[in-house]
Amino acid sequence: MGAAPTTAFGQAVIGPPGSGKTTYCLGMSEFLRALGRRVAVVNLDPANEGLPYECAVDVGELVGLGDVMDALRLGPNGGLLYCMEYLEANLDWLRAKLDPLRGHYFLFDCPGQVELCTHHGALRSIFSQMAQWDLRLTAVHLVDSHYCTDPAKFISVLCTSLATMLHVELPHINLLSKMDLIEHYGKLAFNLDYYTEVLDLSYLLDHLASDPFFRHYRQLNEKLVQLIEDYSLVSFIPLNIQDKESIQRVLQAVDKANGYCFGAQEQRSLEAMMSAAMGADFHFSSTLGIQEKYLAPSNQSVEQEAMQL
């Protein structure tokens, strides 16, 4: 009789409030089950109520945000930080909950508190401890795609994503979520691949310079852009959680990041293995397809757009 696999794989789903983390966990868990994987969704957000998915482990059983706020007279932000520190101090509880689920693919629905992923140490310490339990995670960082329509907000998103990548210390995938709503808040200044591949950001500075408010902060914006380009770490994968092809692209990137695609959990062809190893996933062509699907075509010629710039 074969022993249960010791190495487990999963995703730590992080991102600011309202970016679609819980919806992502629901959609990804359904997709994975359709592929034949056994999935365990773990809710690490004590503020999450009315979960739409079947929850295998709920941190609310250990500590509740409402109880912490009442007992310690804290606001929602301070209460959430305390809850994560309490979980960090009681990781034996979490391990006792996860050990019976060995052999499952884990999805961790994490809190949306931005500072937990940028400079507070509790969540990083929890992930580090999970790595010692032979749990290989990929951080999946969700960002609202409509931020691409505002150059200032997009630079801010790039800074937050970079800080998160450096702080969390996990294999990392950045997603532009809610792609079907990307132009509800305005038109994109450039093609979608400009934002997903984070191309020459000097063009964004030119857009910001046209705004009287941001014109005074040009030197600050130049330094932020220089920092982002010096690290050259941030890129994005567009996601519409209702589109199976979009979910599949994300899953391929995640499986390559945490090593799941190189394991023996599923039957894989040599072609798929080599594609993952060499990175031949043709992001550019897939991004063009997504642009055609969700973005309205521009009626201007290239010369007209250049004149506007």
Image (cartoon, rainbow, N blue to C red):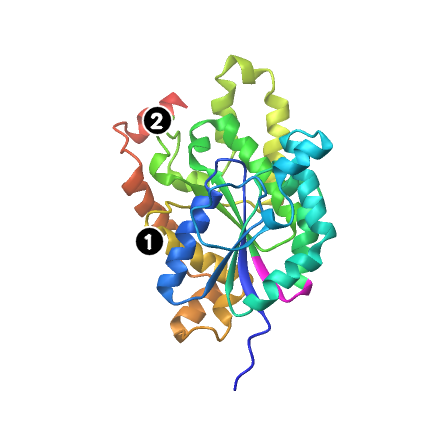
- Considering every residue shown, the one lying at the far top of the view is 212
Q: Which mark is residue 305?
A: 2
Count neighbours of disc 1 (C-alpha within 10 A) and say few if under 14, some if 14 to 19, many if 20 or more.
some
Depth order, front residue of 93/21: 93
- The answer to whether residue 237 of the structure is visible from this angle is no
Question: Which residue is tagged 1?
Answer: 244
307 sits left or right of 119 in the view: left
Residue sitting at x 66%, y 29%: 75
Q: Amino acid at mark 2?
A: Glu
- Tag 1 secondary structure: helix
Rendered location of residue 199, percent (x, y): 48, 40
Rendered location of residue 120, percent (x, y): 70, 41
- Tag 2 secondary structure: helix
Badge 1 or badge 2: first in the primary sequence: 1
- The answer to whether residue 90 of the structure is visible from this angle is yes
Depth order, front residue of 295/68: 68
Count neighbours of disc 2 (C-alpha within 10 A) and say few if under 14, some if 14 to 19, many if 20 or more.
few
134 sits left or right of 157 in the view: right
264 sits left or right of 191 in the view: right
Gap between marks 1 and 2 measured at Cα = 34 Å
Image quarter where the C terminus lies is top left
Q: Amino acid at mark 1?
A: Lys
- Considering every residue shown, the one lying at the far left of the view is 299
Does 268 appear in magenta? no
Depth order, front residue of 239/134: 134
Q: For the residues labelled 1 and 2, say whether their Cβ atoms are less than 8 Å apart.
A: no
Q: Which residues are magenta?
A: 132-137
Rendered location of residue 95, percent (x, y): 65, 61
Residue 47 versus residue 245 in the image, above or below: above
Residue sitting at x 37%, y 40%: 179
